[in-house]
Amino acid sequence: MEDLFRRYGHTLTFAFMALVAFWLLALVILPNLTLFEASFRPYLPVTEIGGPKDTYSLDNYAKFLRNPSPWNVFGIELQAPLNVKTFLSTIFYSTIATFITFALSYPLAYYLAKVVQPKSLPTMILLLFIPLWVSEALRAFAWYIILTFNGPLNAVLVGIGLLEKPIRWQQGVLTGYDAVVIGLVYSYVLFMMFPIYGSIQSLDRNQIEASEDLGAKWWQTHWRVILPHAKPGIASGSVMVFMLSAGSLLVPSVLGSTNSNWFTQTIQQWMLESQDWNTGAAYSFLYILLCTVVVALAMWLFKVKLSDIAK
Amino acid sequence: MSAGIDLENVCCDFGSFRAVDNANVSIKPGEFFSFLGPSGCGKTTILRMISGFTEPTQGAIRIGGKDVRGLRPNQRPTALIFQNLALFPLMPIWENISFGLEVRGVDKATRRKKAEELLELVELPGAADKMVSQLSGGQKQRVAIARALAVEPAVMLLDEPLSALDLKLRQHMRAELRSIQKRTGVTFIYITHDQGEALAMSDRVGVMSQGRIQQIADPRDIYNNPVNGFVAGFVGENNVFTGSVRNPATGMAGYETKLGTFRARLGELASGENVKLYVRPEHTLLSETAAAENSVPVTISEVSFEGAFIAVHGVAENGQTLVAEIRNDGSATVPANGSQMFMQFDPARAAILPDAAVAKG
Ligand SMILES: Nc1ncnc2c1ncn2[C@@H]1O[C@H](COP(=O)(O)OP(=O)(O)OP(=O)(O)O)[C@@H](O)[C@H]1O
Ligand SMILES: [Mg+2]
C-alpha cells in the first residue's frame, strides 16, 4: 500500500483500487448473487413477478432429476433422468479429453524441458503458441471443416487408400462425442502442457541421470522419478483442462453430433431458448457444485493435495 | 567383484574446446584412485565418460578389461555419486537405497532387508523410513553411498562428494569412506579439488590441469617428487626462484638466479627455458649464519603463528619474499621482525621443474 502511494500518488492509487473493487463487486459478485437468488424463484410471466406465486423454493433444482428416459450405457439398458445422463456424459468425455491431453502433453513437455537444446526452445514454444492466436471459435470451425463428410480428412484417407469410402466423422466412429473430444483436446492442450513443462523443468537433471546410473530403464525413470516430480503440474493441468472442457459451450455446439449433448448446452437451452433464467441459474450452480465434487474425488483418488496444485 | 579401469588416449571435445586431452591411466581393481585438480580442469568429464553419460571423442575406456564404448550408464558396472548427491526427495530413505534393486525386479522384502543392511554398514541404522529432507548433510552423504553400494558396482565413482560438508564432518567422512572402501574392496575413483583430501585418502593420485593429467603417483611421491611446477604448486606451498640451468649433470644441476647460483635436483622433464626452482617452506631452514651453498640473506618481515608451525617471511635483497616454516616444538627460537637471517635449503630437497604440461589443442 505504502509502496503504491509512493509510486503513483494518492489519486492514481485510489483510482486503481476503485476500479478493482468495481470489477470484483459489480462484474463478478453482484451478477452471481443475482443469479443465485433467481435460481430459487419460479419462472413467471412478467406480470406475476413479485406476486403471491413468487416464493423461494428448490423446485428449479429438483427439475434436474425429472424426465427419466431410456439410456443405453455400453449395451446395458438403464432408465435415468435426461439431465443426469447429459451430466454424466459430459463428465465422462471431459475426463477422456483430459486423459488424452495428458498423454499428448507429457512427452512434449518432457521433450521441451529436458531434451531440446536451450537455443531452439523459444522457437519451439512460439510454434506451440501460434494456434492460440486464432480464436477458439475459429479453431473449432477449422476442425468442423476438417471432419466434414466432403472434407480434407476423408479426401486424404480415401486418396491414400486407407478408407474405401468417406466416413461421417462428426456423427462419431466410436461415440457421438468423437469430434467434441478432438476439439476439446485441441483447444486446451497447452493448458496441460505448460504446467507439466514447468514442473519437469524444475527437476534436477542429476536425478534423471542418477536413476539411469542405478540401472533404471527409461520408462522406470519416468515412472519413479520424473512423473512423481511432475505430479503437481499434471494435477493443475488436469483440473484446468477438465474444468475448461466441462464448461465449454462452443466446442460441443460446433462439433457435436446429433447424439451428443453437453451439459452447458442444456443450460444454454434453458436460458436462451426457453428464456427461463431461473432454471438455467439453478442448473449452473448445481453443475459447478457437481464438477467441484468430481474434481475433489479425482484429487482424492490420485492422492493430490490442494497445496500441490497451488505450486 | 571389483574391476580395474583403463583409459587409453582418451580425449573429450565440446565443440572446439578440448575438456580432456589424451588421458592415459590404468586403475587397478580395488584401488582408491583420486583425480585432483582445480575447477574446470575436466575431472567431472572423466567421471562422466567412465559412467557412460558422455562418450569420449577419441580413445578407449575399458572396465574390467572390456571396452565399454556405446554402453549406456545403466549397462555399466559403475555407480556414480553425484556432486550434489541427487537423492530422490520423494522416496523414503530405504526406497532410495534399494532403487537400483527395485528396477532390477527384486521383491520388496529382499529390498527392504538389503537397505537395512546397508544402512547398518554406513552407520545410519533406523533411518529407513525417514525422508531425505529429514537428514543432515553427512547423513545424506551416507545414504548416497549406500544407494550406490546397493547395486554392487565393480567401480564406485565419486564426484567431490564431501565438498558440501563442514571441515570436521569432512575429515570424519574421509576416514569413513576409506574404511568402507577397504571393507567392500570396490574400486573407488574419487574426484576432488582439495589436495589434503586426495593425499590423505588415496592409494594413487592423478593431478590434472586444463584437461591434461600432469602426474600419476602415490600421494607421497606427488608431494615429494612433483614432476612439474603445476603439481608442486597445487599440492603444497613453494618458494619459487626464476633463473636458468647451469652445468646440468645426472640428477643435479646448478641454477643461476639474481640471488646467486643454487644447486638442486634436476627434474626429469626439465629442459629448455621454462624451468623454475621450487623449495617447500618446511624444507627451508632459518639460520643466523650463512651456509656454504643454497643460502639467501633475508630481512624477517612477518612471523605468523599457524598453530602446529610458525611461518616466517623474509625479504631477500631483490625484494622477493621467501617463507620458512619452523615447527612449534620449541626447538628453534622464533626470530623477531626486522632481524637479519639466512634462509637455506638442502640441494636434495629443492627441485628444478618445468611449468605445467598443457593441451596441444
Ligand atoms: N556439456 C558441456 N558442454 C560444453 N562444455 C563443457 C560441458 N561440460 C563441461 N564443459 C567444459 O569442460 C571443462 C571441464 O569441465 P568439468 O565439469 O569436467 O570440470 P571439473 O574439473 O569437474 O570442475 P569442477 O571442479 O568445477 O566441478 C569446463 O571448462 C567446462 O566448461
Ligand atoms: Mg566437477
Image: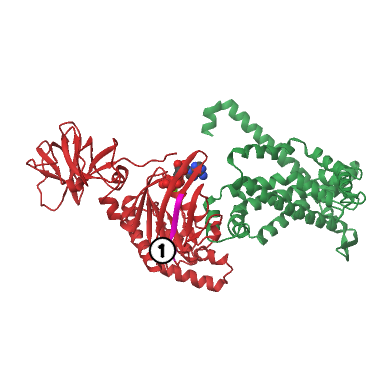
Chain colours: A green, B red
Q: Which residue is drawn at 11% across and 52% down?
A: B330
Give the residues drawn in magenta, as a range.
B2-9
Estimate the x, y position of residue B41 in percent, counting from the top left: 41, 44
Q: In which quarter of the image is the C terminus of chain B?
A: top left
**Observer-nearest of A242 and B278:** B278
Residue A279 seen from this side: no
Q: Does the magenta stretch include residue A40?
A: no
**Observer-nearest of A112 and B220:** B220
Residue A78 seen from this side: yes
Q: In which quarter of the image is residue A76?
A: bottom right
Q: In this view, does A113 lie above or below B144?
A: above
Estimate the x, y position of residue B6 in percent, counting from the top left: 44, 56
The amino acid on which the numbered mark 1 sits, given as a three-letter code, is Pro
Q: Residue at x 74, y 47 (%)?
A: A244
Estimate the x, y position of residue B8 in percent, counting from the top left: 45, 52
Q: Is residue A1 left or right of residue A68?
A: left
Q: Is residue B6 magenta?
A: yes
**Mark 1 residue element:** loop
Q: In this view, does A220 lie above or below B335?
A: below
Q: Residue at x 44, y 54 (%)?
A: B7
Q: Name the residue under label 1.
A: B29
Q: Is residue A28 left or right of residue A139?
A: left
Q: Which residue is drawn at 42% across and 65% down?
A: B186
